[in-house]
């Protein structure tokens, strides 16, 4: 334990993480550098393997790097193991540079048909969310800033405007003379 102020973790996973952190902190600098070098190499190998297999949109990260049979890196939650990369329209990634992949008209049409079918099966809220994202993406920086400023001004106005049911609203029927004895 690094400090007496911190209570010991009760979760077994957190206990293991703490042991791994302590072990890593006590490691010599040279061993840490070797571990990081191995981790970087493994990351690059996975990246190249994902490109060779044809994975364009999702890249799996291998965070279970072992050193002498000990797991040093903390495991991430299952949903965080997939890192989404931007969608590639007509391009496929090659190591170090981009190479254009020409799609046939049939492939383009089949993709459009799939997109139309997916869009048709969406709820109105999902469609509106897609439209909002597209509108935001197509805005110029000045338009985005104007929208932010407008939103701030609208919030400021709402803050300074009393609601009709507010207890802070002045009672028009209040008469000061009625309260005096």
Image (spheres, rainbow, N blue to C red):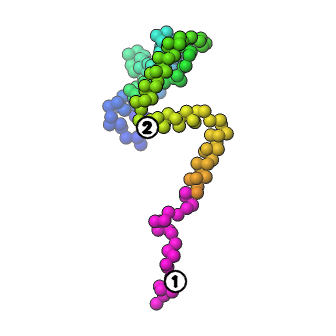
Q: Secondary structure at mark 2?
A: helix
Between disc 2 and disc 1, the foreground one is 2
Q: Majority secondary structure of the magenta segment? A: loop
Q: Secondary structure at mark 1?
A: helix
Return the residue nearer the eye: 44 or 166.
166
Q: Is residue 112 among the parts visible in the rendering?
A: yes
Return the residue nearer the eye: 62 or 110.
110
Residue holding disc 2: 124
67 vs 77: above or below: above
Residue holding disc 1: 176
Residue 124, by quadrant, is top left
Q: Is residue 26 among the parts visible in the rendering?
A: no
Return the residue nearer the eye: 143 or 124.
124
Look at 57% across and 36% down and name the residue there: 136
Q: Earlier in the sequence, mark 2 or mark 1?
A: 2
Circle 2 residues within 10 Å: few <14, some 14–19, many ≥20:
few
Residue 180 magenta-highlighted: yes
Tally of marks: 2
83 vs 104: above or below: below
Look at 50% across and 12% down and name the residue there: 106
Q: Which residues are magenta?
A: 158-181
Residue 11, percent from left and from top: 33, 34
Q: Residue furthest right?
A: 142
Is the C-beta separation of discs 2 and 1 under 8 Å? Answer: no
């Amino acid at each position: 334990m690094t400090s007496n102020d911190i209570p010991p973790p009760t979760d077994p996973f957190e206990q293991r993480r703490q042991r791994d952190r302590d072990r890593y902190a006590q490691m010599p600098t040279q061993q840490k550098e070797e571990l990081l070098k191995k981790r970087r190499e493994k990351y690059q190998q996975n990246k190249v393997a994902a490109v060779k297999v044809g994975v364009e949109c999702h890249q799996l990260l291998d965070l279970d790097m072992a050193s002498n049979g000990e797991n040093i890196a903390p495991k991430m939650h299952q949903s965080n193991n997939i890192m989404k990369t931007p969608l590639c329209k007509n391009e496929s990634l090659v190591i170090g540079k981009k190479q254009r992949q020409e799609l046939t008209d049939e492939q383009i049409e089949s993709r459009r048909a799939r997109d139309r079918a997916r869009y048709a099966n969406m709820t109105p809220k999902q469609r509106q969310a897609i439209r909002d994202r597209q509108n935001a993406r197509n805005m110029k920086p000045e338009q985005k800033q104007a929208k932010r400023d407008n939103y701030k001004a609208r919030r400021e106005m709402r803050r300074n405007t009393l609601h009709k049911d507010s207890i802070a609203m002045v009672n028009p029927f209040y008469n000061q003379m009625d309260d005096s004895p």
